[in-house]
Amino acid sequence: MKELDCRGLSCPLPVMQLRDLLAQGKPASVTMLVDNEAAKENVSRFLIHQGYQVTAAEIHGDFKVVGTNADTACEIMSGQELTAAAASGSKKILMMITSDRIGHGDDELGTKLLLNFLKTLKEMGPDLWRMVFVNNGVKLTVEQAESLPVLQELAAAGVSLLVCGACLNHFQLLDKKQVGETSNMLDIVTSLQVADSVINI
């Protein structure tokens, strides 16, 4: 069994340390200690992608994540599946959403403009591959957000939604997220590398 204590490390360092550990040879089991919910979710998801069965428990405010090798076919490292998809030749547009409004000046107008923008994104068709939500943009993915039904419709249509776990944690919204996959900077950077084009909002 391999053990990593990543308490006190900010995103994406816990996932990167785990990736480096697994690159040395996949152990039968691995245990990680992290100190926040976002890190727990990111580490758990990474282990699952690596073919591990995962259990997680809260212990005195920290989280213990245990992965047991399930001996299943899986990706070797984070992003390999994305790289393979990029090689298939299909166009991939990534939308980086960094705010809960468009532009500066009148916030009420900016909020309405962004909602109308999101509603119109379906016109991009299958070219819209992934949306990444960071900073104030994560507020669009939580319960009672006016944008939530629109994003749920896009997700149902096959658009991948990544929501920054560290940002959710910062705004204390981790338990209020209703759509998308809680993610980390390693996944986000890999997505930017794979995308054919990136649009920043």
Image: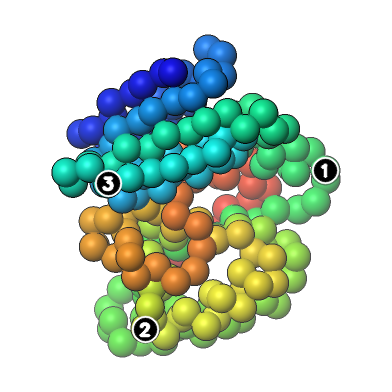
- In the foreground, 152 or 127: 152
Residue 62 x, y percent position in the rendering: 22, 42
Residue 33 x, y percent position in the rendering: 30, 33
Tag of residue 147: none
Instruction: Give me the residue at 28% from left, 26% from top.
Output: 5
Please tell me which of labels 3 and 2 falls first in the chain: 3
- Within 10 Å of the Cα at label 3, are there few (<14), some (14-19), or many (20+) other Cα atoms? some
Which residue is denoted by mark 3 in the rendering? Answer: 58
- In the foreground, 91 or 44: 44
Q: Secondary structure at mark 2?
A: loop
Foreground disc of the pair 3, 1:
3
Which residue is denoted by mark 2 in the rendering? Answer: 144
Please tell me which of labels 1 and 2 falls first in the chain: 1
The relative height of residue 157 versus residue 21 in the rendered view (above or below) is: below
Which residue is denoted by mark 1 in the rendering? Answer: 88
- Within 10 Å of the Cα at label 2, are there few (<14), some (14-19), or many (20+) other Cα atoms? few
Q: Is residue 58 left or right of residue 129?
A: left
The relative height of residue 110 versus residue 134 in the rendered view (above or below) is: below
Tag 3: amino acid? Glu
- The answer to which quarter of the image holds residue 123 is bottom right
Tag 1: amino acid? Ser
Residue 138 x, y percent position in the rendering: 38, 64
Q: Secondary structure at mark 1?
A: loop
Residue 13 x, y percent position in the rendering: 35, 31
Instruction: Give me the residue at 75% from left, 65% from top.
Output: 126
- The answer to which quarter of the image holds residue 140 is bottom left
